[in-house]
Amino acid sequence: MRGKMTRRRATGVLAGLAVAAAGAGGLLARARSGSLDYAFTGPAPDRGLGLAPPLACTPGTLSSTAGPFYTPGTPHRANLREPGTTGEPLLLEGLVLTPDCRPVPGAVVDIWHCDEGGRYDNDGFRYRGHQFTDAAGAFRFETIRPTRYTGRTPHIHVHAQGEATRLLTTQIYFPDLADSNARDRIFREALLMRLGRAGGREWRGRFDFVLAPA
């Protein structure tokens, strides 16, 4: 993995390696207990996305390791795109739901991923941000498609949590990269987003997160 390494980040790498060493223990059907340091202030304004909920929901979205490059306290924003990026634009949207498919309004969705060159920003907040769901449980980020780096297929890291749910830590993947996904030992098919074109070069991905109760 590329990126500047600080003492703080070195500590994070060691912690990430410890999680990875746990193997299957890091991939649970329900998220581990924990809490994000963002205040729950109620639902965000209506985004008007009109996303239809699924007909059935799982007991909880599959969790996955956060990896070594998480940075807390990200900006509250929906647009993560950087000026001059050569990455393909991506709209990432979806719903945050309970196991019986009810919306979780006011849930925090915190994402981070590498840039178009496979690099994480470990000193700032490039391609990092969080937002809260609206009354329908909907969220949307404007970002880019990350690329692969050594040992990893392209992916987006996610933390999601409602005021009365467990913290979900997971990663989501792109369905049009089957060969790359198959070579990644962390990849899980259950974490594939739905993907299509929004127009021109822009992609539109959707993933609905199901959060287990606290």
Image: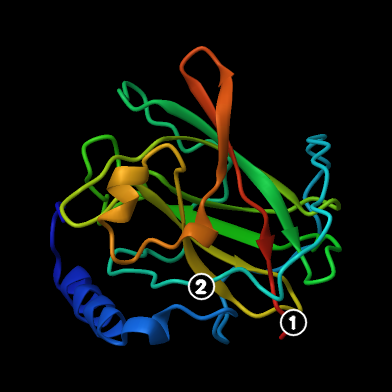
Q: Foreground residue, 55 or 52?
A: 55
Task: Say few, some or many: other residues with alpha carbon within 10 Å of mark 1 (under 14 / 14 to 19 / 20 or more).
Answer: some
Residue at 51% in and 81% down: 28
What element does badge 1 sit on? loop
Q: Quadrant of the N terminus?
A: bottom left
Q: Position of residue 21 (x, y in %)?
A: 25, 84
Name the residue that disc number 2 marks. Answer: 63
Q: Position of residue 78 (x, y in %)?
A: 58, 40
Residue at 30% in and 44% down: 179
Residue 140 quadrant: top right
Q: Position of residue 206 (x, y in %)?
A: 62, 43
Q: With 184 as the anchor, is 204 left or right in this view?
A: right
Q: Which amino acid is tagged 1?
A: Pro
Q: Which amino acid is tagged 2?
A: Ser
Q: Position of residue 18 (x, y in %)?
A: 25, 85
Which of pointers 2 and 1 lies earlier in the amino acid sequence?
Answer: 2
Task: Say few, some or many: other residues with alpha carbon within 10 Å of mark 2 (under 14 / 14 to 19 / 20 or more).
Answer: many
Kindly give the residue lying farthest to the top in the view shown: 200
Q: Can the viewer see residue 188?
A: yes
Q: With 47 as the anchor, is 132 left or right in this view?
A: left
Q: Quadrant of the C terminus?
A: bottom right
Q: With 144 as the anchor, is 135 left or right in this view?
A: right
| Whether label 2 touches label 1, CB < 8 Å | no
The image shows residue 199, relative to residue 150, as above or below, that is: above
Q: CA distance from mark 2 to mark 1?
A: 14 Å
Name the residue that disc number 1 marks. Answer: 213
Q: Can the viewer see residue 114?
A: no
Residue at 40% in and 87% down: 25
Q: Foreground residue, 120 or 74?
A: 120
Residue 26 quadrant: bottom left
Q: Foreground residue, 44 or 143?
A: 143
The image shows residue 121, relative to residue 5, as above or below, that is: above
